[in-house]
Amino acid sequence: MPANMLTVQTFVTSKDGEPTEDCEDSIHPMPGCAADDVPLVAFAVSDGVTTSFFGGVWAQMLTARFAECPAAVFDPSSSWVDWLKPPQDQWQAEMRKRAAAETASFYMRNDVVSRRPAAATFVGLLLDSPAPDGTIPWRALVLGDSCLFILRKDRPHSLKLTKATEFSNIVSSAESYACDRPFQPDFYRDEKPLEEGDTVLLATDALSKWLLLRDEEGHPVWGTILGLTGRADFETLVGHARREERNPLENDDVALGIISIGQPHQLYRAARFEPRPRPVPQPRAPKPESRLPVPLASANGHSGVKKRSGRKSERDSSKKTSRRMHQELKEKTRELDSLRKKSDAQSADLEKALKELEALHAILTPPAPPPANPPAGSL
């Protein structure tokens, strides 16, 4: 492959407001690597799942594994599970080492003992030797919501997700412990070879979704992506994209790889990003003084102007409250008097009824007979 035919750039940045070392995305080659340092035939990007256990470390091990032996994962006599075993062993050994440290927390040790796994999405691209006609055969695998884009002369192609609505919080991923039914990546072999002018992009989920959404809405930014010349340009693009008023780039870690075969097609050069940031909220102006000044007559007869005193307002409010309470007391007193009068009337009626009942009882009850004379001789 002619050295002047292939151009490679890679970028990684963390969430807004977080340090770079906390970034859970990984890419190969690492940003800043010269062409003489690594063979430009294998490229990979991985996104550590945030809710998993040390997903960023696992993502770095996956991209490093692909850099070391990219062809092995496409070997029909092997399997995806076999290819994952070396990085799984490496990750598990690293976690045991961290858990054994004196500074390790109880939670760290408990997660290692309970075999809590790390998880990460993954995209790998392997370029084969150029064909006699100058085209470049390629192979790739995609697992999860990280994507591979091919900007051909007719239109952009995306693997594996093709619409922004296909992204969700549930993703397929590679895990750091072997399981009975692991997620399997999609393999792409014997695809149409890359031609001069084609460009391949490897991107993690947040950027992939944003690129697809911009293209769907008729505002593609492929030209801006292809025109990046360094880290400063990349950081500026990400910053502006996150502040967009409509459909901003999600605040997530971002990794991007750009592999160009010669000069990009003219079709994409005019698709530039024009930032339209959301308005910055303006601080609210203080409310105007609602109390109007009132004229006062001074002791010497001169009239002056003085703002209404807050204490006077408090006294006025206190007087109103006192008057209201006195009025309520009068109403309650009247109600009590009315109830007392009703109670007295009911008591008089009850006493009269009792006297009538006693008189009736006396009429109906016969008088008691007189006592009998005692027998003679008795004491």
Image (spheres, helix red, strand yellow):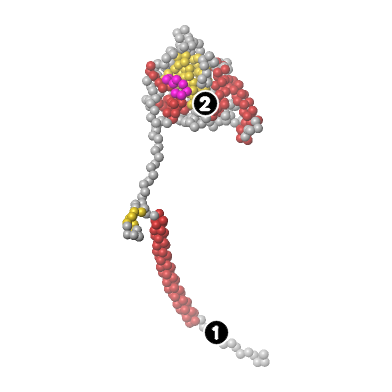
The earlier-in-sequence mark between 1 and 2 is: 2
The magenta segment: 226-233
State if disc 2 and disc 1 touch (CB < 8 Å).
no
Q: Is residue 322 above or below residue 76?
A: below
Q: Nearer the viewer, residue 135 or 27?
A: 27
Labelled disc at residue 241: none
Residue 288 percent location from the top left of the image: 36, 47
Residue most extreme to the front = 300
Residue 93 percent location from the top left of the image: 63, 26
Query: Which residue shows up at 36% across the image and 50% down it?
Result: 290
Residue most extreme to the top = 132
Crowd rating for badge 2 (residues with CA inside 10 Å; few <14, some 14–19, many 20+): many
Is 150 a magenta residue? no
Labelled disc at residue 25: 2
Query: Which residue shows up at 48% across the image and 19% down it?
Result: 9
Residue 152 percent location from the top left of the image: 42, 17
Q: Nearer the viewer, residue 194 or 326?
A: 326
Query: Which residue shows up at 63% across the image and 35% down it?
Result: 106
- In the image, 357: left or right of 282? right
Q: Is residue 246 above or below residue 304?
A: above
Residue most extreme to the bottom = 376
Give residue 83's quadrant in the image: top right
Query: Which residue shows up at 41% across the image and 64% down it?
Result: 326
Mark pair 1, 2: CA separation: 115 Å
Q: Nearer the viewer, residue 30 or 93?
A: 30
Q: Amino acid at mark 2?
A: Asp
In this rendering, which labeled residue sits more in front, label 1 or label 2?
Answer: 2
- Say what secondary structure mark 1 lies in: loop
- In the image, 87: left or right of 157? right
Labelled disc at residue 368: 1
How many numbered circles does the render carry?
2
- Say what secondary structure mark 2 lies in: strand
